[in-house]
Image (cartoon, helix red, strand yellow):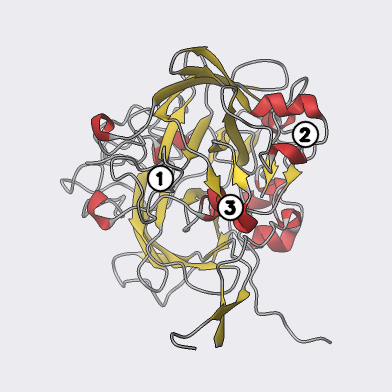
Amino acid sequence: MTQKLDVLQETPSQTAGPYVHIGLMPTYAGNGGYYEEEIGTTPFVDESKAKGEIIEIVGSVFDGTGWALRDALIESWQCDAGGVFPGADGADPAFTGHCRFAADAVTGEFTLRTVKPGSYKGRGGTVSAPHISLWVVARGINIGLNTRIYFEDEANDDDPLLNRIEQRPRVDTLIAKKIEDGKYRFDIRLQGQDETVFLDL
Amino acid sequence: MTSLITDQGPLIPRNRAIHPEPYDPAYKTSVSRSPNLPLLSMESSPSEETGPTFGHNKLGALDNNLILNWTKGAAPAVGERILMHGRVLDENNRPVPNTLIEIWQANAGGRYRHKKDTYFAPLDPNFGGCGRTITDENGYYEFLTVRPGAYPWPNRANDWRPMHIHISIYGHSFGQRLITQMYFEGDPLIDHCPIAATIKDRSQLDRLVAPLDFSKSRPLDFLAYKFDIVLRGRRQTMFENKLEGM
């Protein structure tokens, strides 16, 4: 017998199920007014004071048959326009960096209204291109899926994560397309052709 | 010069073997919703090592009392009254204080208050089915609620969900984000549930089964079930700290 390790194992995940909105977005579930203040309805403390460009990202989450999920719930987390994560010294006080949004129950389309993130320096001084982290849950997804939104109008060539993708055409699955000023499209494909790159981080 | 061990390193890589299989034909919806291609592995970065924080000021006094929170205290929900309690720890066996836990569940009859749930068990006019709280400085949390009912669901012809409570936890970094479900000791439906069975290692599924806990039960009021949660930890690294003047 060897010595016993002191570490614990993470609790296993289970699917968020079809009724995840009850817990995380009660108003969407038809239970508006449940809480005095719902969490994550917007990443802004005060949109009129937030620094940087305000953008909207629209898209859908598609299953392997090409059907847009009507019950997907997504969370985002990002740094502010200056590349500082909320909570750190110097972060924009008008911005929380975190948002919850859901696929529309009729159309399957989601909208994220936020600020365009800046770039930041990580471990070893590597600079990450501007991106928003996403976490996707739904019925049928047994463990939440992590991915990122990058932007086609930013310099992505030296991004350390994008550069790890061996099949170069797959990089495009992480890049939001500009459809007009301040508006981008970012679709998530759970499987099949153009399957989104999901992350094990 | 002094040095000390800190846990500000990258997140400990996730052990996917303890988690459910993303693709599991017995859980039909997973077939078209699971990635076919391997996930891209990468050391965590500030995007995953930081995360949102939530203060107590966002929470209402009844937010962790599902027996009363839907009616704002006016009338209690129907069902077997239970206290769900436990601790949130990380993989380094340290408590995770001040982190948000949210739960949601069916009522005692097995019906969710959701516009898409059409099961004919009735809604309880005094039960909403969600709650939230923030762990204390030692990582403890508790909810007062009713035991949810089992219910049938469209999968194979006659599948039933065991009694369960859904749990969402943040931790302190976005890479720790976790949703799971708590089951109840002794529920025979656990062994028949294709969602529970997406976890292939039975000893790992057992970690989602809360034991009855008489130590926290209040006589003539409620039973208690204990449910501890472990979130990912960060790698501990030696941090060298130069003292001033040296």
Q: Quick check: do tags 3 and 1 share a chain? A: no
In the image, residue A21 lies at what x, y percent? 43, 34
Which of B166/B218 is in front? B166
Kind of residue sitting beneath label 2: Pro
Q: Secondary structure at mark 3?
A: loop
Of tags 3 and 2, the one toward the viewer is 3
Q: Which residue is mark 1?
A: B108
Kind of residue sitting beneath label 3: Gly
**From where the camera sits, is residue B179 visible?**
no
In the image, residue B169 lies at what x, y percent? 47, 53
Q: Chain for mark 1?
A: B
Residue B89 horizontal side relative to residue A90, left or right: right
Q: Chain for mark 3?
A: A
Which of A126/B148 is in front? A126
Mark 3: give few (<14), some (14-19) or many (20+) Cα within 10 Å.
some
Q: Quick check: do tags 1 and 2 share a chain? A: yes
Q: Secondary structure at mark 2?
A: loop
Residue A167 horizontal side relative to residue B216, left or right: right
Residue B25 circle label: 2
Q: Which residue is mark 3?
A: A122
Please tell me whether residue A42 is drawn above or below residue B3 in the rendered image: above
Kind of residue sitting beneath label 1: Ala
Residue at (61%, 50%) from the top-left corner?
A13
For the N terminus of chain B, the image quarter is bottom right
Residue A41 circle label: none
